[in-house]
Image (cartoon, grey):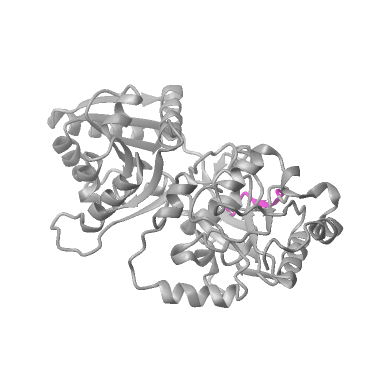
Amino acid sequence: MSNDRPQGVCASDFASIVGEENAVCLWENIEIGQQKLIQQAIASGNSPSCIVYPRTQQQLAAVIATAHTNNWRILPCGSGSKLSWGGLAKGVNVVVSTERINQLIEHAVGDLTVTVEPGMKFSDLQALLAKSRQFLALDPTAPESATIGGIVATGDTGSLRQRYGSVRDQLLGITFVRADGQIAKAGGRVVKNVAGYDLMKLLTGSYGTLGFISQLTFRVYPLPEASGTVVLTGSAEAVSRAADILRGSALTPVQADLLSTKLVSSLGLGEGLGLIARFQSISESVKEQSNRVLGVGQKLGLNGAIFADGDEANLWQRLQERIHTTPTESVITCKIGVLPTAAVEILTQVELGLIHISSGLGLLQLEDKNQVLKVRDELRSAGSDRTQASSGFLTILEAPVAVKEQIDVWGYTGNALPLMRRIKEQFDSKNILSPGRFVGGI
């Protein structure tokens, strides 16, 4: 149903479920900051009638059921820190935020698991876990404001995937509200759980198109005793060789990335391309592994430095801020995937970028849509032997709405789209959840 439906209906229908203080109706009544966030996620000319803040899983289910009955299209969100990612939602009637469903359900310290509601801030969860000398091994974008539900919905994993894997690898259980308002569960609260279908992996990175996450269980890890970071900088050929050596060695970095020249210089790390590797373990192991990487760099003629304590923490914080902060609104932030052996070649063609040395996943900042299309074509053919038809991808995360309306955000060329559409039909036959945000306009 379109926005022709009288807007006042939102007030009566949703306020009766969540209370008047948790339902803001009429577009002009929504805070300017919230309006800007929403406008980055929706197609031009579409203003939703309501933003609703359920406070419990039961309220969330009732809100979704009401929208389903009335055929209202929903844009799910948490704090909104990643609302601008992905495709543009179309025909949205209601924005539903889970940021007020934010409680800790259980922290099983001995089992190394934690169960939380989706609106809990990532930073708040880490602070709670730190009291027991544990942590959730993710390093998402905007860690201070990002919610746990938003991190899972967008599959947002940073450099820590080098050691701990992706969001999917750490998720043990999930509860979600179906498009019809029914509550469903998958997985459990123990590390070894084999019951049921693996809906955790299906919902992770689905951008809210299949269901509304309402509870999550993760494995957690003990905080490491010591930490140290090595940075090598210099020529592309030498940095590429250092990355090859590190990949083939017995060293165990928890984070390891290749950095473009502009990123290296903007962080004050020197000149040329960069390789940054972080080790976390007992103190002796960190020192030994760091020195071995430094030795590799010296043999290859690279400049090297070791960072520890506050300097190290500051370096990684600045690195994340730089790669995710765009200097102008026209800059386009992209997620890429390429064969790890071709990563250096891609980084020499862009000003600002970061690629994980083992997975080949990374982020680029590009200037305009023409550069996006050029790099996307290059990534599809990138590889050590140039024989693979499609060995890389480029997905637009953040870009001006006008750019997202002109080119395909996802750039998917695989053969799984019919299967994706059938899954969407099974989970959301009325197409009311995040319509248009996912691959192929799903």
**Residue 34 as seen in the image, left or right of residue 349:** right
Q: Quadrant of residue 351?
A: top left
Closest to the observer: 216 or 47? 47
- 385 w.r.t. 295: above or below: below
Q: Residue at x 13, y 28 (%)?
A: 301
Closest to the observer: 235 or 308? 235
Q: Residue at x 42, y 38 (%)?
A: 330
Is 103 inside the magenta-drawn segment?
yes
Q: Which residues are magenta?
A: 102-113
- 15 w.r.t. 347: above or below: below
Q: State whether residue 162 appears in this view.
A: yes
Closest to the observer: 53 or 203? 53
- Image quarter hosting the N terminus: bottom right
**Residue 440 as seen in the image, left or right of residue 127:** left
Q: Position of residue 113 (x, y in %)?
A: 59, 54
Q: Position of residue 70 (x, y in %)?
A: 74, 70
Q: Position of residue 242 (x, y in %)?
A: 19, 39
- 182 w.r.t. 267: above or below: below
Q: State whether residue 113 appears in this view.
A: no
Closest to the observer: 58 or 241? 58
